[in-house]
Image (cartoon, rainbow, N blue to C red):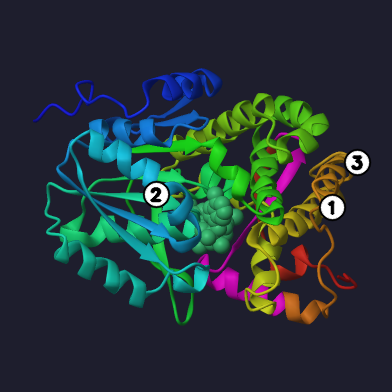
């Protein structure tokens, strides 16, 4: 192994750097969450304005000579330079590969282009992938890393709230096929996940709120204290107040990590993360994945699932009201688009087939506690139900 420290290189403007470092917490992680999976364990490190340090830390963690930096157009321009500087300062050769923006590009064609770029750059079994962007960059770049030469290491640098608390953790990677979303994929745990909350400043407000829906999901299925803490801090989170954002991301990541640790390959517990997703998938399918963000559909699905949890006798009265109030304060939708019940039923029936003949519908037992119930579509959407 070669030394990867760059202490001998003088920064161009030491004074300016120092001032910036003081302002921004010195380029250190402010919080760390560990994901304990035996020899595949890794850390999630959270900091603010520290992309260059992330590059150096990722390089040390990966200990490789060559890296393909997989990113998307909207993120590349703003954030790839600092991350690349950090990687290069640690002696890594970096080839940036840009994927066009949007979930529609998480496909076989773009995957093929990634393999071409990897080969062209001479990546071998001793190389690695770094993903920089939202869930699209992470899922696609991660899947390329999982499959290239039967798997090379990778690290995730998520830049959306959704990717920070959900997509980048847990090792699920994959692509969409023409027949449906996320139909091809692999479990491939990253070697590290690095969050820079400063990247969220450029994230459109609507994307921020949509990712926040998954953060609320983590709280409501798992941790009543966290939900209580979040309830009065919705606006501060969305305004990216570091005093709220960093602890909130930390707790949400820790919840996802805990669930994944106990059920890495989705045998049971990990299904709880699908809270709100039964109806969400139906809504997204009907909208043909246009005009509504995933987190928005999840917000509607959670409001619905909370109401059903009360109606079915799992959750005490008032549970859904509290959840819906938080979602609404975040500007998220909570009512399903007006379509006939039959349309929703048939969409849910497709989910049932995928899950092996049963729907593991996630219900709340109250704020901060959840379980799954094996239900038929007609029990989830009872006769007379209206969107
Ligand atoms: N692997 C998993 O466990 C898992 C879990 C949940 C979702 N996902 C996948 O994640 C994807 C959705 O992730 P997403 O919501 O992050 O979508 P995304 O990656 O498409 O990002 C959303 C939008 O924000 C832009 N963007 C990203 N970071 C930005 C920044 N810092 N500033 C400005 N713009 C920025 C992107 O270019 C894009 O237009 C889906 O493909 C979904 O299937 C995977
Ligand atoms: Zn989701």
Numbered mark located on residue 150 in the image = none
**How crowded is the residue under tag 1: few (<14 C-alpha within 10 Å), some, or many (20+)?**
many
* Disc 3 C-beta below 8 A from ligand 2: no
Provide residue 202's location: percent of width, then percent of height. Answer: 60, 49
Disc 2 + disc 1, Cβ < 8 Å: no
Q: Residue furthest left?
A: 1
**How crowded is the residue under tag 2: few (<14 C-alpha within 10 Å), some, or many (20+)?**
many
Provide residue 203's location: percent of width, then percent of height. Answer: 61, 51
Real-space Cα separation, disc 3 to disc 2, in angstroms: 48 Å
Numbered mark located on residue 317 in the image = 3
Mark 1 or mark 3, which is nearer the start of the sequence? Answer: 1
Q: What residue do we see at 64% from left, 75% from top?
A: 285
Q: Inspect this view and state whether residue 28 appears.
A: no
Disc 3 + disc 2, Cβ < 8 Å: no
Mark 1 or mark 2, which is nearer the start of the sequence? Answer: 2
Provide residue 278's location: percent of width, then percent of height. Answer: 66, 62
Quadrant (top left/top right/bottom left/bottom right) for the C terminus: bottom right
Q: What residue do we see at 89% from left, 44% from top?
A: 321
**Left or right placement of residue 276 versus residue 251 in this view:** right
> Which range is magenta?
345-368
Mark 2 or mark 3, which is nearer the start of the sequence? Answer: 2
**Left or right placement of residue 233 versus residue 17 in this view:** right
Indicate yes or no whether the magenta region holds residue 169. no
Q: Inspect this view and state whether residue 326 appears.
A: yes
How many marks can you see? 3
Numbered mark located on residue 80 in the image = 2
């Amino acid at each position: 192994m070669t030394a990867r420290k760059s202490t001998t290189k003088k920064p161009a403007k030491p004074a300016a750097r120092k001032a910036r470092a003081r302002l921004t917490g010195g380029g250190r992680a402010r919080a760390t969450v560990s994901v304990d999976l035996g020899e595949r364990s890794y850390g999630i490190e959270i900091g603010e304005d520290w992309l260059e340090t992330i590059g150096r830390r990722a390089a040390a963690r990966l200990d490789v000579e060559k890296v393909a930096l997989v990113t998307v157009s909207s993120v590349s321009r703003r954030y790839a330079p600092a991350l690349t500087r950090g990687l290069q300062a640690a002696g890594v050769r970096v080839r940036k590969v840009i994927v066009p923006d949007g979930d529609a590009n998480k496909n076989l064609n773009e995957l093929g282009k990634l393999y071409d770029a990897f080969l062209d750059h001479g990546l071998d079994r001793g190389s690695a992938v770094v993903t920089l962007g939202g869930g699209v960059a992470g899922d696609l770049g991660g899947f390329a890393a999982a499959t290239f030469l039967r798997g090379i290491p990778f690290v995730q640098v998520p830049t959306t709230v959704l990717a920070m608390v959900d997509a980048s953790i847990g090792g699920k990677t994959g692509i969409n096929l023409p027949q449906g979303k996320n139909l091809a994929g692999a479990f491939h745990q990253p070697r590290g996940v690095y969050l820079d909350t400063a990247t969220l400043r450029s994230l459109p407000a609507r994307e921020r709120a949509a990712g926040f829906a998954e953060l609320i999901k983590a709280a409501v299925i798992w941790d009543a204290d966290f939900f209580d803490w979040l309830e009065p801090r919705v606006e501060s989170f969305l305004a990216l107040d570091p005093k709220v954002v960093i602890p909130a991301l930390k707790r949400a990541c820790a919840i996802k990590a805990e669930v994944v640790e106990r059920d890495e390959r989705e045998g049971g517990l990990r299904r709880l993360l699908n809270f709100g997703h039964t109806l969400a998938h139906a809504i997204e399918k009907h909208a043909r994945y246009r005009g509504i963000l995933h987190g928005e559909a999840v917000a509607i699905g959670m409001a619905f699932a909370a109401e059903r949890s009360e109606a079915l006798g799992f959750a005490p009265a008032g549970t859904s009201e509290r959840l819906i109030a938080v979602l609404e304060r975040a500007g998220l939708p909570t009512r399903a688009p007006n379509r006939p019940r039959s349309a929703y039923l048939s969409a849910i029936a497709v989910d049932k087939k995928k899950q092996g003949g049963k729907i593991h519908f996630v219900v709340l037992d109250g704020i901060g506690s959840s379980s799954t119930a094996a239900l038929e579509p007609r029990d989830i959407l009872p006769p007379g139900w209206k969107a």
